[in-house]
Image (tube, rainbow, N blue to C red):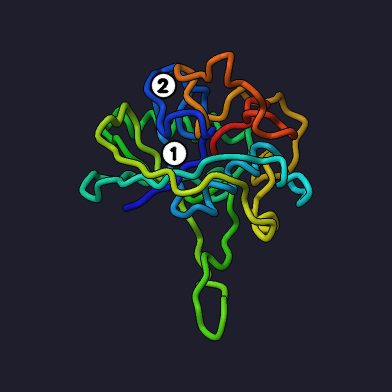
């Protein structure tokens, strides 16, 4: 399969150490955990959700890289059995998801697949039939790979910003089932984002996004 990730353009596309901030399917100190979307839209939705971007005017301030990563098809894949509200919920569902992932990993799982919490089901991609037409309706998923993955090969396929028509499909982050909550803010770095052990040098820290610089504001994976 080919999976997609958004990353700061200055940095590698995978984490390498355990200092990755906690996300939906891993806690503090349990990394690296690599979250891959099925499509570029899925990767962009993760960014938009956790930065809480819903205004099309803000898209002009974004500059991120999208990587396409080849993942072997022969690795066994676990599927966490949780309610849809938990699988796609906000920050207050993370603890339950992390606990489930720990149980799966204790039984030997190195890879899991779950519904995308960031992207609502809808037409995915485009086809050509007398011009551009929306693709088929598809409920996207996220694949999580646990542990260092020095064997994976990736291609940086785009640097830029997501399209405005994606905003309507992004599920807002917040409480259970994505409802807004007044809970505590998430960790400072997004686990699908830049590796902390590969921080940019002082000479290269000019913000690439006037809105939220290098995606270190708040937000977690899922």
Residue occupying image coordinates x 38% and y 44%:
155
> Which of 192/175 is in front?
192
Answer above or below: position of 22 versus 158: above
Q: Which residue is mark 2?
A: 30
Instruction: Say few, some or many: other residues with alpha carbon within 10 Å of mark 2 (under 14 / 14 to 19 / 20 or more).
Output: some
Furthest-front residue in view?
A: 203
- How many angstroms separate mark 2 from mark 1 (CA)? 13 Å
Q: Which residue is mark 1?
A: 35
Q: Secondary structure at mark 1?
A: strand
Residue 28 x, y percent position in the rendering: 49, 19
Please tell me in which quadrant of the rendered image residue 108 appears: top left
Instruction: Say few, some or many: other residues with alpha carbon within 10 Å of mark 1 (under 14 / 14 to 19 / 20 or more).
Output: many
Residue 39 x, y percent position in the rendering: 47, 54
Judge left or right: residue 91 versus residue 103: right
Is residue 114 in view from this perspective?
no
Residue 112 x, y percent position in the rendering: 36, 42
> Which of 17/222 is in front?
17
> Which of 172/57 is in front?
57
Residue 213 x, y percent position in the rendering: 68, 29
């Amino acid at each position: 399969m080919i999976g997609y990730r958004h990353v700061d353009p200055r940095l590698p596309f995978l984490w390498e150490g355990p200092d990755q901030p906690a996300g939906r399917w891993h806690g503090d100190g349990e990394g690296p955990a690599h979250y891959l979307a099925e499509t570029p839209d899925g990767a962009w939705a993760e960014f938009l959700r956790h930065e809480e971007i819903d205004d099309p005017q803000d898209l002009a301030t974004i500059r991120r890289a999208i990587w396409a990563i080849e993942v072997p098809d022969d690795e066994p894949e676990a599927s966490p059995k949780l309610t849809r509200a938990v699988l796609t919920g906000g920050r207050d569902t993370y603890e339950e998801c992390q606990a489930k992932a720990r149980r799966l990993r204790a039984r030997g799982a190195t890879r899991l697949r779950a519904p995308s919490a960031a992207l609502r089901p809808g037409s995915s991609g485009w086809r050509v039939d007398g011009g551009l037409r929306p693709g088929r309706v598809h409920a996207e998923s996220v694949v999580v790979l646990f542990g260092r993955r020095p064997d994976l090969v990736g291609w940086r396929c785009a640097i830029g910003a997501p399209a405005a028509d994606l905003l309507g499909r992004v599920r807002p982050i917040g409480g259970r089932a994505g409802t807004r909550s007044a809970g505590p803010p998430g960790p400072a770095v997004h686990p699908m984002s830049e590796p902390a052990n590969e921080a940019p040098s002082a000479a290269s820290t000019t913000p690439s996004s006037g809105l939220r610089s290098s995606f270190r504001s708040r937000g977690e994976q899922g």
